Image (spheres, rainbow, N blue to C red):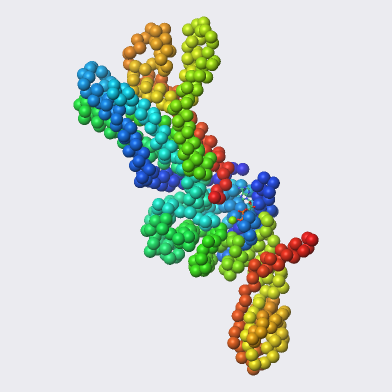
Amino acid sequence: MSDNVIEARGLLKLYGTARAVNEIDLDIRRAEIFGLLGPNGAGKTTTILMMLGLTEISGGTVNVLGFDPVRQPLEVKRRVGYLPDSVGFYDHLTARENMRYTARLLDIPRRDAEKRIEDALASVQLADVGDKRVSTYSRGMRQRLGIAEIVMKGAEVAILDEPTSGLDPHATNELLEMIRGLKKAGVAVMLSSHLLDRVQSVCDRVALFNKGKIALMGTVVELANQVLGAGHPLLVEAQGTDIEGVIRGIEGVQQVVAGGDGAWRVTADRDVRAAVAHRIVTAGGSLTRLADLQPSLEEVYTRYFQKEIRHAA
Amino acid sequence: MRREGSPFTGVGPVFTKELADHLSSIRMMVLTLFVIVFGAFPVASSLQQLRTVVSADAYLFLRIFTLEPERVQITFVTALNFIIPLMAIGLGFDSVNSEFNRRTLSRVLSQPIYRDALLLGKFLGGLATLAVGLMALWLIVFGAGLLLLGVPPGGVEVARAAGFLVVAIAYGGVWLAVSMLFSVIFRSTATSALCALGLWLFFFILWPMVASSIAMSMAPVQFTSADELLGFEQFGQALMRVSPGTLFSEAVAALLNPETRVFGDFSNLFLARSRGTIPNAPLPFDQSLLLIWPQVTGLVAAMIVLFAAAYVIFQREEVRA
Ligand SMILES: Nc1ncnc2c1ncn2[C@@H]1O[C@H](COP(=O)(O)OP(=O)(O)O)[C@@H](O)[C@H]1O
Ligand SMILES: [Mg+2]
């Protein structure tokens, strides 16, 4: 069996004559976190719904874990966990009761179910409030409960639609940590977001969506290299020698810009942190700070579409 | 392309959840209270009246259901005819759209279950709730009859009363299907409730007038034969039978009044005379069943057609809120 858990070829969704998803090709690999990123209305949710067989496909094919969501939706849905955009639960029931209902829908034997529910709630730190009604839950807790449902399901693939939208930074970080946890457990995760920078840190690979098409796909560093020509920006603070000269001499460094006060912004096409530290120290300088600046997807995105527009003009 | 997997996967869990939700809901308590208040009044009055009449009526027990007490002017059956739809609408008007609004629908449908199973489970859950409610009411009436009349009902009477219960549940099923259809069509629960209640009022208040005026407008200036008159009345009756309430009251009349042979005032007399039968001789139970077979089939068919319509519309709907 191939390493891809999801394969889409020429996937198309028409609403009338509008192409909500315009013939995209997409592969999600086993145990990776894949980000579908793009502004609102780009077609992310539609893509997800087609993969789950929850909306009709207008053209092309999808294959999820070897099953066709059009003909075998039950097989797909048995193995794929889905956290919808702004997920809802039955407010008059407790978290455990909500989970029990899902467990019954999944046909999990009663004896297994209780243990799986406990483990799942514990994994998202909701075990102690599991007997409270969901109506008392905050948005972040609901999202975590959604993750717990996926954990309980024992899904091989988790599809999360805008999991961090509407969460405060702290809740966002907690949730991203849980998404990393899913990956550690061997689950392939596909998540969508319109906030590029918020989730880029967890994604192994991303696809940038725009108007129903995938504009760019790859690791964040690859995309940054491709579009910005800089995969690894660094911030260096040091003194004592000709810092700029030393850094320029390192292989892979593309650009060094003085930021004043003994600080430099370095861009390189690979990770040069070790080399920078080593050279500065051996040259007799003292290194006070060496920070890895994440290439900004936001920047990649804006720059890319500026280029597109310029090319088109 | 054919989809794989049983369309009934998941009906069971949905059914049990719906039933549990309904039975524990405040709404169900309110509806039950409503029904009991509405039903208790005519039953109590007719029991009072029946106690004073010491007659050799073979179907004394069934009269509790059908007697129109002098002071109250409403039979228990008429009250049910009116109140069962309200109960069914109360149970079904928000069954699908509330899942949309709570945003639980896409999460539930991402579990291994087809949309038809979800709809069927919800329908059966509502129907079972109705059945539980009506059964409780039925038992209360029966118990009150036993206590106050002091005579046990005969076997046939029990069978006829049980048949009445089944017809009442089927009648409730039709209105449940109506309200679920509206809950699929409209995203707003208020709109859906309003439409279902509107239809209910339409059939109860407006339709008898509409039907008779349609029939009147089609009537010839003068009837030339008894056949023509009979045909005309049957047309008017067919129009009335569009309303599920008519089917219910006819079926119930035949079950609870064993004397019923034909429906409709005029043709009742007319046919009875032309066939030389005595209008007041009671029919055996199986003959009564045969008589109401079209009505019962009509109720069940209406239920299925409405459910199918709801399914077709639901299938085309987008799950995202
Ligand atoms: N039911 C619908 N009918 C018509 N157009 C729709 C419908 N649902 C979504 N769309 C359109 O499809 C496009 C993609 O929407 P969506 O997949 O929700 O985007 P995203 O999730 O990336 O924000 C949008 O332009 C939206 O207007
Ligand atoms: Mg979306």
In the rendered image, residue A296, in percent from the top left (x then y), is placed at 64, 70
In the rendered image, residue B174, in percent from the top left (x then y), is placed at 45, 32
Residue at 45%, 27% in the rendered image:
B205
In the rendered image, residue B166, in percent from the top left (x then y), is placed at 37, 30
Which residue is the extreme one toward the front?
B71
Which residue is the extreme one toward the bottom?
A284
* Apparent side of residue B40 relative to residue A119 in the rendered image (left or right): left
In the rendered image, residue A125, in percent from the top left (x then y), is placed at 43, 65
* Apparent side of residue A87 relative to residue B52 in the rendered image (left or right): right
- Quadrant of the rendered image containing residue A95: bottom left
For residue A62, above or below residue B1: below
For residue B41, above or below residue A20: above
Does residue A65 appear in this view? yes
Residue at 74%, 63% in the rendered image:
A308
Residue at 52%, 7% in the rendered image:
B222
For residue A187, above or below residue B49: below
The answer to which of A102 and A283 lies nearer the viewer is: A283
Q: Quadrant of the N terminus of chain B?
A: top right
Residue at 54%, 63% in the rendered image:
A164
